[in-house]
Image (spheres, rainbow, N blue to C red):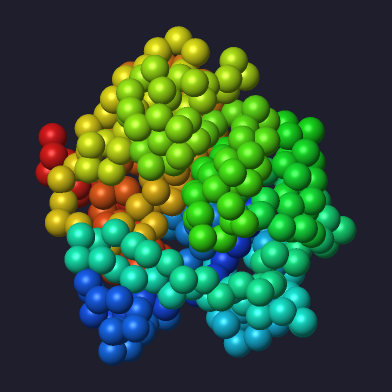
Amino acid sequence: MASNGVNDKSLIVSFGEMLIDFVPTTSGVSLAEAPGFLKAPGGAPANVAIAVSRLGGKSAFVGKLGDDEFGHMLAGILKENNVIASGINFDTGARTALAFVTLRADGEREFMFYRNPSADMLLRPEELNLELIRSAKVFHYGSISLIVEPCRSAHLEAMKVAKEAGALLSYDPNLRLPLWPSAEEAREQILKIWDEADLIKVSDVELEFLTGSNKIDDETALTLWRPSFKLLLVTLGENGCKYYTKDFHGTVEAFHVETIDTTGAGDSFIGALLCKIVDDQSVLEDEQKLREILRFANACGAITTTKKGAIPALPTPSEVHKLLNASK
């Protein structure tokens, strides 16, 4: 008799960076004024992998960490959260990336990065676990891994291998402008791989940046649409999200919660969505089903903003159902 364990589930592989955010113990102060900092593991692709596994899905992370205490701590956190870690490499010559994050009084963030170069930037194509990547039903990635070589080549190779193996390619650019040499370079590299994806999620801020428009409307969003896409999403924070497919488009309302820290909300949202579509992509063609899934994803994103840090705040299914039921 077949078991219903995690091993039978379809695999979501998340590719990119994992790092440590140092978050001030006091909100609403500058980095210089902060009396102290808490370690908060993060990195969008790693957050997505943990979001998936916490919701009961099967996920793996592919990337490179420093062969240092922080790198081994991060690998340990992935394993504790049931993320498959066979795609992780350790670099003996470079440190695990760090970021100092300011939480402004409104819960939004500012970043100062320590990566010169950090281990994640040094992943080489020949270090990729191709067997793991080929077994992915969904391959998810961002754009930070496109900034410098050799990681950019590793990223492009991993995408190619996943696509050839029939995976759905999921792209969340996750713009971090301070990491790019210039805004022009960021826009060019982010858009260079645009057409390869099947599913793309951008935030309202990223939509403005990529289109050069200050309007968050359907017309602007549709300039980013490609005929090969299955789904384009624009997340609007407390205003929910907009969705576009070849046959329909619309908006799904957000859940109103008391926001403490927005870190990881977008990762939680996309992780939830991928979890719900990995076994049956036909839901992307059924508007009613897609709206239900996006409502679930919005609930996951909302819950993540109610606690500090990304990983501790990623929800379990029971927390999500509680919010969904309370909002009926």
Position above or below: 158 against 54: above
Relative depth, front residue between 320 and 302: 302
Relative depth, front residue between 77 and 172: 172
**Rendered location of residue 258, percent (x, y):** 15, 56
One can see residue 300 in this view: yes
Instruction: Left or right? Give the position of 4 relative to 204.
Output: right
Q: Which quadrant of the structure image shows residue 25? A: bottom left
Q: Which quadrant of the structure image shows residue 103? A: bottom left
Position of the C terminus, as image quadrant, is top left
**Rendered location of residue 56, percent (x, y):** 45, 52
Relative depth, front residue between 207 and 127: 207
**Rendered location of residue 112, percent (x, y):** 46, 71
User: Residue extending furthest top?
Assistant: 247
Position of the N terminus, as image quadrant, is top right
**Rendered location of residue 97, percent (x, y):** 59, 73
Position above or below: 217 against 191: above
Instruction: Left or right? Give the position of 21 relative to 95.
Output: left
Residue located at (39% from left, 17% from top): 219
One can see residue 283 in this view: no
